[in-house]
Image: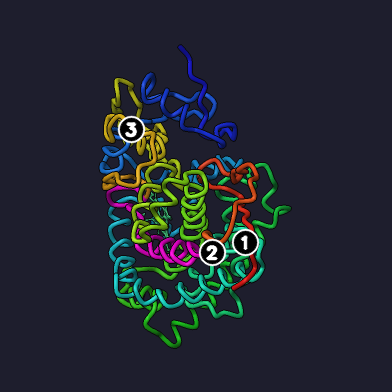
Amino acid sequence: MSIDYDPFSLECRIDPYADYARLRKEMPAYWSEASRMFVLARYGDVASILTDPDRFSSDAMAKVLAIGGGREPEPGTPQMPGNIVTCDPPDHTRLRGIVNRAFTPRRVESWRPIIEAETRAAVDRMRMAGSFDVIADLASPVPPTIIAHVLGIGPEHHDAFKRRATILSAAMTGSLRFVDPVESGAAEAGFKQGRHLAGVIAERQAAPQDDIVSELIRAQGEEVLTPEETLGFVGVLTFAGSETTTNLIGNAVRVLIERPDVYERVIEDPSRIEALLEETLRWDTPVQYIFRRAKEDVEIAGTKIPKDGIVTLLIGSANRDTEHWGEDAEEFDLDRNTSGHLGFGLGIHFCIGAALARMEARIALEELLPLLQQSEFEGHPFDMIDSVQFRGVNSLRLRRRERSA
Ligand code: HEM
């Protein structure tokens, strides 16, 4: 038996799930020679590593994404300060404590009106146009606009902010991996985005408000956060919360298109949108895998992983493991108990934006449903985004059946 699986190959973009099933069954801790990493496919192994930061470091997230982006980092390259995703305790504990203060449920709820307004405006334009693309017209532009708002960036700068966030996200997750960072515009976008965000931080420093950036600056005043970390964390938010949410909305709408039975039940009772989104986060999750580095020799699923070995944790596979979810794990089931899905990770790095992403996606689906009822899918093949780590579709084009209001 041989399995030829490379997490960085683009071939499994269309459907990675058959490979995942074989890995879980035959090689749950697989050494990928092509990417020189161990690949872990079972729920139990993935979950136990995510909850064991003492033995598995998140610094692998920075290193491996750079390699995935086609650029081997120079040895000794410093980590970006404030990049909460890539740091371990005690730094992570300190940063997370501050960031938790910034993302309180009350503050997340305060963003509802702007999310509703932006989503309604986008859906109204789609309705008027008659022919529309759920990705290009709604799922792609709204999340970065919301992040811009969350960061206190004025509406006049939203378009430039969105454009740069899109270039940077493509550079980090795959699409630009074989493209020179200068020629692709990623270097310039990164520089301008950094300069812009530094300007926003300086404005809040002069006149604090009741927002996230002001909260971070307060922590700077208490000397628990450095100015570089503030900028780094704000930078992380610009990409962590955009394309991921785009793909959740897109993957959920794709389920509605492909599964008329699910669609009928959601139309019949729109409160099922929540179940639709949670099962999408399990069954076709936007972030397919993340990385950790073993800090000591360990043995997983009978395979020895040496100190400093990199492990790829296949969230997309763990979320379909029959050992955890039962025999029908590969099926999309609106009635499933989805608690424990790993779509937002697990443990100390659990997604800080989960509540925001859920609210954005829920509002998007609520606003879209009436329009979907009046529309039909144009029937094109699903073109997957050019990313090795994220999963989503490039476009979902529909047309209104009749143009009366
Ligand atoms: C559907 C949308 C989203 C998905 C699927 C998603 C997924 C994830 C996953 C899997 C992790 C864990 C990474 C790890 O353990 O290494 C994570 C962490 C994180 N996410 Fe999200 N995310 C989404 C939306 C957002 C949003 C909207 C924001 C911010 C506004 C955000 C900010 C973050 C941050 C800052 C972390 C790092 C937390 C830490 O390291 O303590 N995410 N996300």
Question: If the image is split into quadrants, where does the N terminus sit?
Answer: top left
Kindly indicate whether the residue at mark 1 contacts the one at mark 3 (C-beta within 8 angstroms): no
Residue beneath disc 3: 328
Few, some or many C-alpha atoms within 10 Å of disc 3 (few <14, some 14-19, many ≥20)? Answer: few
Farthest right residue? Answer: 183
Residue at 28 percent across and 54 percent down: it is 90
Q: Which residues are magenta?
A: 344-371
Residue beneath disc 2: 371
- Spatial distance from mark 3 to mark 1, Cα to Cα? 35 Å
Residue beneath disc 1: 400
**Along the line of sight, the residue nearer the viewer: 124 or 190:** 124
Kindly indicate whether the residue at mark 1 contacts the one at mark 2 (C-beta within 8 angstroms): yes
Q: Amino acid at mark 1?
A: Arg
Q: Is residue 356 above or below residue 264?
A: below
Which quarter is ligand 1 in? bottom left
* Residue 367 lies within the magenta run: yes
Few, some or many C-alpha atoms within 10 Å of disc 2 (few <14, some 14-19, many ≥20)? Answer: some
